[in-house]
Amino acid sequence: MDNKVKFNTKNLDLFYGDFQALKSINMEICENEVTAFIGPSGCGKSTFLRCLNRMNDLIDCVDIKGEIIFDGKDINGDIDVINLRTRVGMVFQKPNPFPMSIYDNIAYGPKCQGLKDKAKLDTIVKDSLERAALWDEVKDRLNKSALGLSGGQQQRLCIARTIAMNPEVILMDEPTSALDPIATLKIEDLMQSLKKLYTIIIVTHSMQQAGRISDKTAFFLMGEVIEFNETPKIFTNPDDKRTEDYITGRFG
Amino acid sequence: MEAIKRKKIKEKIIENFFLICAFVAVVSVLAITFFVFYNGLKPFVSNSYPFWNFISGVEWRPGSNMYGIFYMIVGSIFGTLGAILLGVPIAILTAVYIAEMADSRIGKIIRFAVELLAGIPSVLYGVFGLGIIVPYVLKISPMAQGESLLATILVLAIMILPTVVSISETSISAVPKEYREGSYALGASKIQTIFKVVLPAARSGVMTGVILGIGRAIGETMAVMLVCGNPIAGIPTSLFDQIRPLTTNIALEMGYASGVHQELLYSTGVVLFVFIMIINLAVNKLVKTKVGS
């Protein structure tokens, strides 16, 4: 486990107005691993995830202090946010395909970056859908509306859409919480194959899911990281009593 | 038992009263339609004036028994089309600005102004057009008067703003924030997000606003009457030509007309009626097929 550090946060504080949602987060997230964030609702894990591609910019009165070093640069500093988001993609809790065709959903990101070449777009669409294990199911209906897909297919489409940007990191905010168990399994399998190519950071409410898919797990509580370690260690022999209580279901 | 019976009767009476209220609208629309069509079709049924001459004629001279409304139909279409082409883009961009860009204080001010615009009586739009727009048009016009297609278009474009802005803004605001987040997360800029995701998602609402705007523009009478010139003949061929829309034709002469003249004014109303129906149906169909695809 000598993977390169992708994200390194130093003393990260985040305030929504007067409320401090994140308290002095220090964390190193490594390349080509799956890192899981667990913790009870409102503990700040999604908020932290959204810091990593500056999605919190969209919310008013958010104040961030501290550093998030991504490939040697502090992303809270003077950087090109659009460039950051092309390198750090995101999949959301609720599948959110755009109300357009399957093809256009995938081609959207590359087109926004100015790619017009139809042949190249075709290749990107096919590759992305194949990597997201969706190609066989949709190859005959690429021009149909993406809203006609099932929930699980929509979520894999959203993953494909993110892959189409060829990002380095994929952030996933509870990507399976709106899906049935079979669709969930498919997404988990997908993550395993994707981690060879991308760094994956996932927020999940399901302890089993974190245990199944992640290499490292961080346990959040009240805006703090209580414990961050190899997943097997967290789940079998946590250092902190609160981690153990949460994992064994004594609260949360 | 007596008390329960009385209560039931009371309930029944109240219910019927509501029904009567609801019927007022239904009866009104039927009565207006019947009245206009009955009077408007009379001259063609009784053959007192040939339908083809009416619909294709380009002169309206009641004194010489010439009643052609083709140039009015063209005038109505040009006026409405121009107002839509000019007013709709302005309205949509205004709605986008209020809903997506303006900070809440500026947004409130603009929204308030737009709402005020909606409340101004149409005759005042006409007076404004006559006092301000017509003289300006005259300055650049090769014609001897400023009342023109151009002046009509400008006044109508302002008049449709409130309708299109408020309905568009509502539907833009109703676009789920997940779409915006998805777009931003893919590295799209704000402008790309608005034009490629938000506006297409709000399309059906925006189109509803445009339909209502068309309805308002084609049906507007008072404001238009003051700035359009109301000539007695001639198809408009330039923006500076005068026009005589169907609506103003009715309003100008209904007060004193009689006989065939009066009946043909009703016929003008029938044409106007049919026009609005066709436009509504066509645009409705257009919206449905587009959304369906």
Image: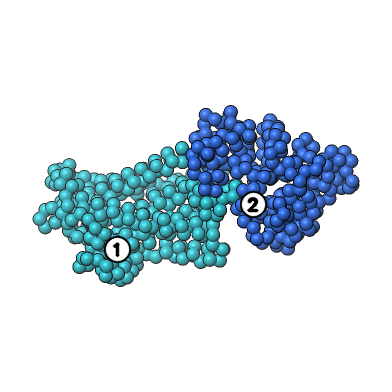
Is residue B147 in view from this perspective?
yes
Discs 1 and 2 carry the same chain letter:
no
**Relative to residue A127, is residue B52 drawn left or right?**
left
What kind of residue is marked 1? Answer: Ala
Q: Looking at this view, is B162 or B29 the one in front?
A: B162
Q: Quadrant of the C terminus of chain A?
A: top right
**Relative to residue A124, is residue B247 drawn left or right?**
left
**Relative to residue A73, is residue B120 drawn left or right?**
left
- Secondary element type, mark 1: helix
Q: Nearer the viewer, mark 1 or mark 2?
A: 2
Q: Which mark is residue B151?
A: 1
Q: Against A64, is A124 above or below?
A: above
Q: Against B112, is B61 above or below?
A: above
Q: Which chain is blue?
A: A
* Shade representing chain B: cyan
Write down the residue under mark 2.
A84
Cα distance in 3D space between marks 1 and 2: 50 Å
Q: Looking at this view, is B50 or B180 the one in front?
A: B180
Quarter residue B246 falls in: bottom left
Q: Quadrant of the N terminus of chain A?
A: top right
Q: Chain of mark 1?
A: B
Q: Chain of mark 2?
A: A
